[in-house]
Image (cartoon, rainbow, N blue to C red):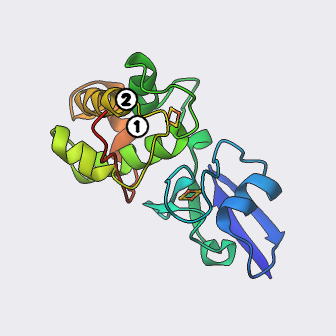
Amino acid sequence: MRITVTVDGTSYTDDVEPRTLLVHHLREKLGKTGTVVGCDTSNCGACTVHLNGQSVKSCSVLAVQADGGEVTTVEGLARDGQLHPVQQAFRDNHALQCGFCTPGMIMQSIDLLADNPNPDEEAVREGLEGNLCRCTGYQNIVRAVRDAAGHMRPGAGPEAEQVAGGERTTTGVGGDS
Ligand code: FES
Ligand code: FES
């Protein structure tokens, strides 16, 4: 089947098999390897991207379901050489160890902040409960999301606007570590 998907602002038209998963289309056909596969069974959230403004686990979506749609990956977040505020907050708060979960964590965090611009710790953990960190670095991830929230609220600075148009996601950090 021929599909056209806009990914990180660029339109791509490709022939795909009906069974091709969106994550495989992104990685193998479009070279968007910033989106990773951690489980392939919809459990880990490492493959989270935004599809038409909603966060989705791209291993649970067929590429054909994205036809005509817009996908944002972690590779499409930076603007004019500036990291997205959530990316910057993850960096500032050492919210990654091996970094494998980080793309999905960041995409999900942006989504949860679009829904709740001022989440408390519990809300962050709940919002990220579908994203797993095998390094168990949850404490700093939660700290980073709350830090990002402070930078993204209206009046917080130019980066606030970058997020305002933001998208949304689906899951969260339920761990305790
Ligand atoms: S690779 Fe998609 S949820 Fe784990
Ligand atoms: S930083 Fe290693 S899986 Fe999260």
Q: Quadrant of residue 23 in the image? A: bottom right
Amino acid residing under circle 2: Glu
Establish if 127 lies above or below 144: below
As drawn, is 164 to the left or to the right of 7? Answer: left
x, y percentage for residue 48? 52, 54
Q: Quadrant of residue 16?
A: bottom right
Position in image of residue 85 (x %, y %): 40, 29
Nearer the observer, 135 or 14? 135
Q: Residue at x 25, y 54 (%)?
A: 115
- Where is residue 54 drawn, in percent x and y? 42, 62
Queried on whether the Cβ of the residue with tag 1 lies below 8 angstroms from ligand 2, the answer reads no
Q: Is residue 42 left or right of residue 156?
A: right
Q: Is residue 74 visible?
A: yes
| Disc 2 to disc 1, C-alpha distance | 5 Å
**Residue 90 is drawn in which quadrant?**
top left
Which residue is denoted by mark 1 in the rendering? 162
Local secondary structure at mark 2? helix
Secondary-structure class at tag 1: helix
- Between residue 159 and residue 37, name the one nearer to us: 37
Q: Residue at x 68, y 69 (%)?
A: 21
Q: Is residue 28 above or below residue 142?
A: below
Whether label 2 lies within 8 Å of ligand 2 gets the answer no
Residue 144: x and y in percent read: 33, 28
46 with respect to 133 (left or right): right
Three-letter code, disc 1: Gln
Q: Is residue 61 above or below residue 163?
A: below
| Screen quadrant of the N terminus | bottom right
Closest to the observer, 23 or 96: 96
| Mark 1 closeness class: few <14, some 14–19, many ≥20 residues within 10 Å | some
Confirm or deny contact between disc 2 and disc 1 (CB under 8 A): yes
Q: Residues within 10 Å of mark 2 (few under 14, many from 20)?
A: many
Residue 159: image tag:
2
